[in-house]
Image (cartoon, rainbow, N blue to C red):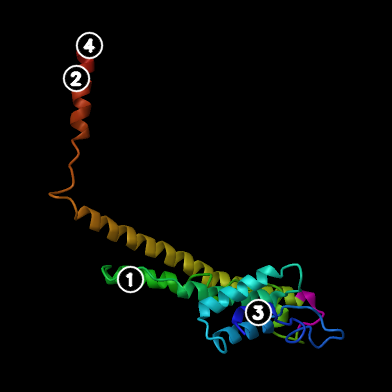
Amino acid sequence: MSFANYIEEYDRKAYGAGSDKKPPTDRFSALDVREMFGKGTGKYDRSKAEAAQMVLDYADSIKGKSKMGGGTRKALDKLRGYLKEDKPQENNDDRPDPVKEAQQEFEDTRLDKPENLMPRLEDAYQDSPGMYDDDANMGAIRGGDDLNEWYATKFVPHLEADANATMHEIGDDSRYFLSKFLFEPPKLGSVQDVFNKYKDEIEDLD
């Protein structure tokens, strides 16, 4: 059986959340995501990026047909991180070290990486089962605290890294193109000389 056939025949009621209910609930849970992805990279010997893409495509195809919760979305977001890692990186061998370091900092702080994803309010309940059950106020407080922490430690540093990398790249590109002039950059004339020339001509018309 191929991985594609395994996915097509996957029983969403047999594993993960909802499978222990009577009757079992059709639910594509975070456990299902991890199980399917693990089979793809293990038994079916697919790369992480290839297996992740197939699981994500499957999740898109069953939207509205099966239940999915916050845990499922978080697990799918993690798979999207594997797609980014599989993309070929720009060859930076000719870049100065400060530019390379700034670019690497930008890549490390990308907000689509699994470890940098924005926290979801509903996950405040799932991360601590039993602690905040039936207490919407505490769940909302914890979710707000998580979001504030993410903003200060992930979002703002990423913006700073983005601006820093852009600044270094523009500076390096400018130096590169300036070095391609055959002699030297063209010199502009004096604005004062131009002003005086036309000023005198206008005054001669009086």
Question: Along the line of sight, which residue is nearer the eye, 94 or 117?
Answer: 94
Q: Disc 4 residue type?
A: Leu
Up the image or down, 161 lies above or below 130; here it is: above
103 with respect to 158 (left or right):
left
Q: Residue 152: horizontal and vertical position, in percent? A: 54, 71
Callout 1 amino acid:
Lys
Q: Residue furthest front?
A: 1
Residue identifier under label 3: 7
Specify the quadrant that holds the N terminus.
bottom right
Work out how far the residue at label 1 is from the one at label 3, CA to CA, in angstroms. Answer: 40 Å
In-front residue for pair 5/82: 5
Q: Nearer the viewer, mark 1 or mark 2?
A: 1
Q: Which mark is nearer the camera, 4 or 3?
A: 3
Q: Position of residue 60 (x, y in %)?
A: 66, 68
Amino acid of disc 3: Ile
Which numbered disc flags the more N-terminal residue, 4 or 1? Answer: 1
Part of the protein shown in magenta: 132-137
Secondary element type, mark 1: helix
Q: Position of residue 65 (x, y in %)?
A: 76, 70
Q: Earlier in the sequence, mark 2 or mark 4?
A: 2
Identify residue for label 4: 205
Q: Position of residue 10 (x, y in %)?
A: 70, 81
Residue under label 1: 100
Q: Look at mark 2 in the image and give the residue it sits on.
A: 200
> For the residue carrying disc 4, how many other residues have a C-alpha within 10 Å: few (<14), some (14-19), or many (20+)?
few
